[in-house]
Image (cartoon, coloured by chain):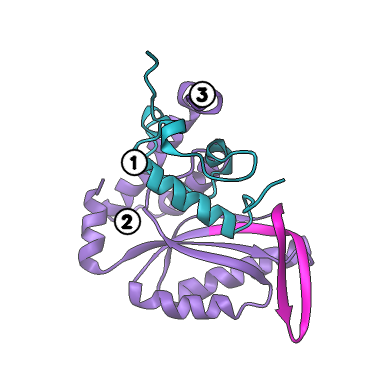
Chain colours: A purple, B cyan
């Protein structure tokens, strides 16, 4: 599925990426916010534009992850998991990754190519991501037609997830045996 | 005869996200292994996406590699 915006982006040489990461659990709530904004400013500096995000939240890890910092190996069973979706020139993603890798508070990260539209089925994330996009784009009336198309798409996804039927059917449908 | 239906086609899910652990954990068995298409009825296209999503979720410790 490729929308007009996506085709336009391909010509311009813009790709949508998502950075998922775990911050070490030893950070305080305030430090997490600071580190997250630091991480975002890093992407912004490389010309990235944000599409959606989720602020890091404490999560239990499925297995123990160890990180070695200055000859001391530390093991963690929980972490602050967050993600940010952004569009940037593919040439800039390698330098971004290099800087993310050097981040001391990041336990583990993943950078994937994705699509502009919301891919989360879980309603909570969908709403938080959409409100962010809407609040950012809604403020400036001079937003280009592309941006408006994006907002429309996001609003539609929210409307769809707000609608009771699809969500409940997703939750309750068991795997066919 | 029972016809199998693809979960992702039924719910109109075009992109499977690794962060959607509630959804993708339906497709792993109690040991944490990926359930095959034959058993889950997922279309080939969705199964490929699903496998990638599960592997990404495992890497990010959202799902286990081995569960006991």
Q: Residues within 10 Å of mark 3 (few under 14, many from 20)?
A: few
Q: In the rendered view, tell whether residue A176 sits above or below residue A138.
A: above
At a point 39% along the width and 77% down the height, the residue shown is A92
Between disc 3 and disc 1, the foreground one is 1
From where the camera sits, is residue B36 visible? yes
A73 to the left or right of B6? right
Badge number at residue B60: none
Locate residue A147 relative to residue A32 in the image: left or right: left
Residue lying at the far bottom in this picture: please name it.
A70
* Placement of the C terminus of chain B among the 4 image quadrants: top right
Tag 2, which secondary structure? loop
Residue matched to label 2: A142
Image quadrant for the N terminus of chain B? top left
Residue under label 3, please give it: A173
The residue under the point 28% across, 56% down is: A144
Do residues under tags 1 and 2 come within 8 Å of each other at their CB atoms?
Answer: no
Examine the structure image and report whether residue A74 is included in the region drawn in magenta. yes
- What x and y, as percent, mark residue B38? 42, 33
Q: Residues within 10 Å of mark 2 (few under 14, many from 20)?
A: few
Q: Of residues A10 and A152, which is closer to you in this image?
A: A10
Magenta highlight: main SS: strand
Q: Position of residue A14 (x, y in %)?
A: 30, 66
> Could you give the CA–CA distance between mark 3 and mark 2, rounded to whole angstroms?
44 Å
Q: Is A105 situated above or below A166?
A: below
Q: Earlier in the sequence, mark 3 or mark 2?
A: 2
**Residue at image point 34% right, 72% down:** A90
Per the image, label 3 sits on a secondary structure element best described as loop
Q: Give the residue number, with chain letter if any, for mark 1.
A: B44
Mark 3 vs mark 2: give the one in front. 3
Give the magenta range. Answer: A59-83
Mark 1 Cα shell of 10 Å, populated few (<14), some (14-19), many (≥20): few
Q: Which chain letter goes with mark 2?
A: A
């Amino acid at each position: 599925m490729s929308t007009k915006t996506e085709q336009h982006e391909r010509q311009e040489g813009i790709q949508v990426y998502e950075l998922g990461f775990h911050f070490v659990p030893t950070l305080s709530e305030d430090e997490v916010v600071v580190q997250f904004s630091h991480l975002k400013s890093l992407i912004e500096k490389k010309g990235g534009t944000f599409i959606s995000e989720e602020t890091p939240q404490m999560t239990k890890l499925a297995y123990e992850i160890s990180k070695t910092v200055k000859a001391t190996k530390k093991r963690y069973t929980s972490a602050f998991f967050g993600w940010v979706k952004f569009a940037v020139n593919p040439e800039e993603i390698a330098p971004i990754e290099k800087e993310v890798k050097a981040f001391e508070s990041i336990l583990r990260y993943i950078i994937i190519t994705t699509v502009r539209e919301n891919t989360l089925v879980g309603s909570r994330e969908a709403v938080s991501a959409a409100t962010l996009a809407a609040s950012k784009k809604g403020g400036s009336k001079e937003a280009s037609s592309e941006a408006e198309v994006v907002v429309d798409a996001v609003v539609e996804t929210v409307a769809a997830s707000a609608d009771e039927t699809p969500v409940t059917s997703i939750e309750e449908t068991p795997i066919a045996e | 005869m029972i016809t199998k239906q693809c979960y992702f086609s039924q719910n109109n899910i075009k992109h499977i996200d690794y962060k959607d652990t509630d959804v993708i954990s339906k497709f792993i068995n109690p040991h944490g292994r990926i359930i095959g298409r034959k058993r889950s009825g997922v279309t080939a296209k969705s199964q490929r996406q699903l496998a990638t999503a599960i592997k990404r979720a495992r890497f990010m410790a959202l799902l286990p590699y081995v569960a006991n």
